[in-house]
Image (cartoon, helix red, strand yellow):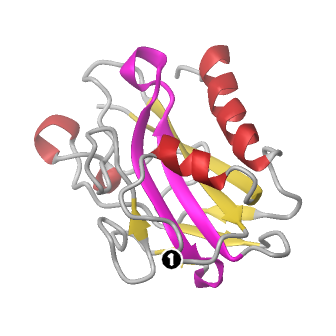
Amino acid sequence: MKAISFFNAALVSGLLLSVTGTAQAAGMQVSSSSFNDGGTIPATNAGDATACGGKGVSPQVAWTNLPAGTRSVAVAIVDPDGAKGSGINHWVVYNIDAARGELKEGEAQADIPGVTIGKNVAGIAAYRGMCPPAGDRPHHYVMTVIATDIKPGTLPAALSREELMARLKGHTLGGQSIVGLYGV
C-alpha cells in the first residue's frame, strides 16, 4: 500500500492549516459509517461502474464536539494522489447548519435544502465518486469537516474548493479529517 508522499501530506496539511489554523480542533470528532479512518472505501462511493467499479453515492459523514461558536460546517473530499500528485476535488459541501450533525450516505449528491454543493474537479456542482487510474495503487481520499462561524446559507452556490477556502479565511474555528483508500 502506498503511503501519502511527504509532498502530498504537506500539501493537504498546509491547506487545512491555512484555513483552520490547526489540523485538529480539541475534541472535534469526524466519522463515517461508509468507511473507517484508514480503511477501504466501498465501491458504492466510487465513480461509475464501467470505469471505476462503483455507484457514485456520496459517503455518510458525521461531526460532533464542534468548537464553541460553530454555526455552519463545510465538508470536502480531496484525492491528494490524483492528477499525478497535484490533487483532485471530489466533493465540496457547505452552508450546512452545524446542529445537523451529519450528511447521510447519498443525501448530498447535489443541492438539497440546507446544503450547498460546490464544484468538483470537472467544474460540476455535484459529488464525484472516487476513480483512480486502473492499475494505480489505491489513492488516499481525505474527507475534512471544517467548523465555521458563518451563518448557514450565507455563502453563494457552486463555489470551487479553492473559492470556498478563500471565503472561509478568518471564519474557521477548527477542522478534522479522516482518510479512506480506493483503487481499481
Please determine whether, in this image, residue 164 is positioned above or below residue 112. Answer: above
Q: Position of residue 2 (x, y in %)?
A: 53, 20
- Pick whichever, 68 or 56, lies toward us: 68
Total numbered labels placed on residues in the image: 1
| Residue 89 in view | yes
Amino acid type for the residue under numbered disc 1: Gly
Q: Which residues are magenta?
A: 71-100
Q: Position of residue 62 (x, y in %)?
A: 59, 70
Tell me, yes or no, whether the highlighted magenta stretch contains residue 53: no
Residue marked by disc 1 = 153
Is 75 situated left or right of 25 in this image? left
> How would you classify the magenta stretch by its main secondary structure?
strand
- Pick whichever, 179 or 12, lies toward us: 12
Quarter residue 97 falls in? bottom right
Q: Position of residue 124 (x, y in %)?
A: 25, 50
**Residue at position x 79%, y 73% from top?**
65
Quarter residue 90 falls in? top left
- Pick whichever, 103 or 33, lies toward us: 103
Is 21 situated left or right of 149 in this image? right
**Residue at position x 25%, y 54% from top?**
56
**Residue at position x 39%, y 69% from top?**
105
Q: Secondary structure at mark 1?
A: loop
* Extreme residue toward the right, this view: 26
Q: Position of residue 64 (x, y in %)?
A: 72, 73
Is 28 situated left or right of 81 in this image? right
Tell me, yes or no, whether the highlighted magenta stretch contains residue 90: yes
Q: Quadrant of the C terminus?
A: top left
| Residue 5 in view | no
Please determine whether, in this image, residue 92 is positioned above or below residue 104. Answer: above
The local crowd at label 1, few if under 14, some if 14 to 19, many if 20 or more residues have their Cα within 10 Å, is some
